[in-house]
Amino acid sequence: MLSLFLVLWTSLQTPQSISDSIRNAINFAESDSTKAALYYDLAKHYYGFEQDTAILYAQNAIDLAESLGLQKLQASSLNIMGVALLISSEYERALTSHLEALKIRETLRDSTGMLESNLNIGNVYYRNGEMGKAAEMYEKALVYGLATKNLRGQSMIYNNLGNYHKDRWAQNQSKEDFDQAVEYLQESLKIKEELKDNNGLVKTLTQLSELSIDDPQKAKDYLERALSIAEANQDIENKISVLHELASYHLKSKNFEIAKENALKAYRIAKDAGSHFYVSTAAEYLTEAALGQNDYKSAYEYLLIKNEADRAVFNDNRQKIREELLIQYESEKKELENQRLIQEQEYLDLTIQRRNELLLGTAILFLVLAVLYWLQRKNHKKLQVAHNLLAEAHQLSINQTARIQEQADHLNAANLELSKANKFRDKIFSVISHDLRAPFSSLHSIIQLWDKKILSEEELFEVMPLIAKETNSLSLMLNNLLIWSKSQLGSEEVRFSSFDISDLVAENTDLLLTQLTQKKQQLTIEATPGTKITSDRERLSFIVRNILMNAIKFTPPEGSIKIDYPSPGEIRIQDTGQGMSPEMLSKLFTDRVASQKGTEGEAGTGIGLMLCREFAESIGAKILAESKIGQGTTFTIILD
């Protein structure tokens, strides 16, 4: 029987309290995005044993995620709906759901999601009898699994490919299919042992036992090993499943007494766990064992137990469906009531606002009439003279105040511009000294070696190309900095332009190639040519170059540095260097951190990352840093 890694029964592992707590959380959720995530969690909870309920919750999650633009959550919900539909044997709807999820994941370039969708589409084809199409989808999924080094995904795909060839072998008895089935299942078993995936180990061992038809002892060994793993991990579901397989194995071997013992153990565990489904299965094996021993009375008793368990399974499903429908009705009723209360409150607020506006208008009108009445009672001529004198004095005061304020504003603006110019000039000199320190240091080291006669003439000729390249890089860097400084001097204005982010990264890695070569470090760039962004090119270039210099500085010889673009507008630089403590990480972009020496004693000024932070803020970017001692550091530049 093909194992498609679909959970067929999870009531032993997911108690009712889990679904109750999630539903309560939905009732109190303040945002639709939170509700969408909780509906998805409920769908995951139910898909293995109540598919109709899982489909209902998955659809709620899909609708909310689509309206909110949460594409990743929408794809995950479509995927879980497809699995539930597959278990319900609704193959056409399941395929449609998985294809929609795959389309979204391809748009997002979600490699793990594409692996999952291709695997599940293969499962739909397989269950629908289209075995060739299923194998093609498994092979596509395997490509993503190998590319992303997703061992768990690889183990699942190898398992399904093994079952594909196992079923073909069952049809045509081809030795090639038999060997392929064993090879794939053994590969899956090896990965699961590495991952310590005990649940998967039990399933794969059970499948390998089915292929050991020519070696009954080997089949038995596989099953007994699977049983020992399930018992060691107190995995009730797998323990019951393996006991059923052992009972079936011994029934085929006509060892009815041993088959009865295994089935009886499974029956008692299932009964204690309250699983009517597994009680029914165990009772069926017990009936066959009793018939094999000609114990018709026991066979009849076990048959009655099976029928009673089947009825209980049917009744349980009906009761749960009724409960879910009632909960859905109550939730919708509460939502409608909330909407009504909101509308009533809005109407009340509008009424109060209109009344206040009317009162204010009445008060203003009354005040105007009072002023007019007062003016009529005064001597118009005397009042006019006094008013004119006062107006002239007032205007004179306003004019004088305006002139004084204008002069003060001019002085403040001049002081501010002068302060900015001085500050920016200091920043330019800091940038130039910081960027030129490393290449000058490299050239100085080579010259010292030659001056002290440590380098022979032959060795000097060997390093001359490096010196030439270093000098050229130094000249290019100096020219760029001077051109930038000349254009920026006296102004801190940000200059945006459109350019290819890959070209910018390549220019800076070329400038630092000598330092990389000297420390024998490996640089990997996962380039994405043609990625255009709009930003201040020189400031972004300084940020990238400074982070790369730090990565080289704090990464030991023969270490590795990786540059990639996890999403549009992001540059990630990872190294395998010495890493930083949480305390040092918290001070990283401030002036409170002292310069640290590199892995080979390289000195620094301690201002690089502080300037990176200022430049990032000026162009609307962010710099995120993650690090652990001994495990390296990751910087991510995020451009808004």
Image (tube, rainbow, N blue to C red):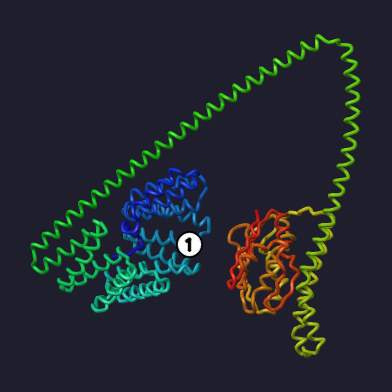
Comparing 371 with 278, the one in front is 371
Q: Kindly indicate the quadrant of the structure image that contains residue 217.
A: bottom left
**Number of numbered tags placed on the structure image:** 1
- Identity, as a three-letter code, of the amino acid under mark 1: Thr
Q: Kindly indicate the quadrant of the structure image that contains residue 323.
A: top left
Residue 371 in the image, given as x and y percentages of width and height: 76, 14
Residue 262 in the image, given as x and y percentages of width and height: 21, 69
Q: Provide the secondary structure element on which disc 1 rests.
A: helix
Q: Residue at x 86, y 10 (%)?
A: 379
Residue 607 in the image, given as x and y percentages of width and height: 75, 65
Q: Residue at x 18, y 61 (%)?
A: 283
Q: Is residue 465 left or right of residue 149?
A: right
Q: Is residue 587 above or below residue 311?
A: below
Residue 485 in the image, given as x and y percentages of width and height: 82, 61
Residue at label 1?
Answer: 112
Quarter of the figure with the N terminus? bottom left
Q: Residue at x 35, y 72 (%)?
A: 185
Comparing 363 with 7, the one in front is 363
Q: Kindly indicate the quadrant of the structure image that contains residue 596.
A: bottom right
The crowding category of the residue bearing disc 1, from other C-alpha atoms within 10 Å (few below 14, some 14 to 19, many at least 20), is some
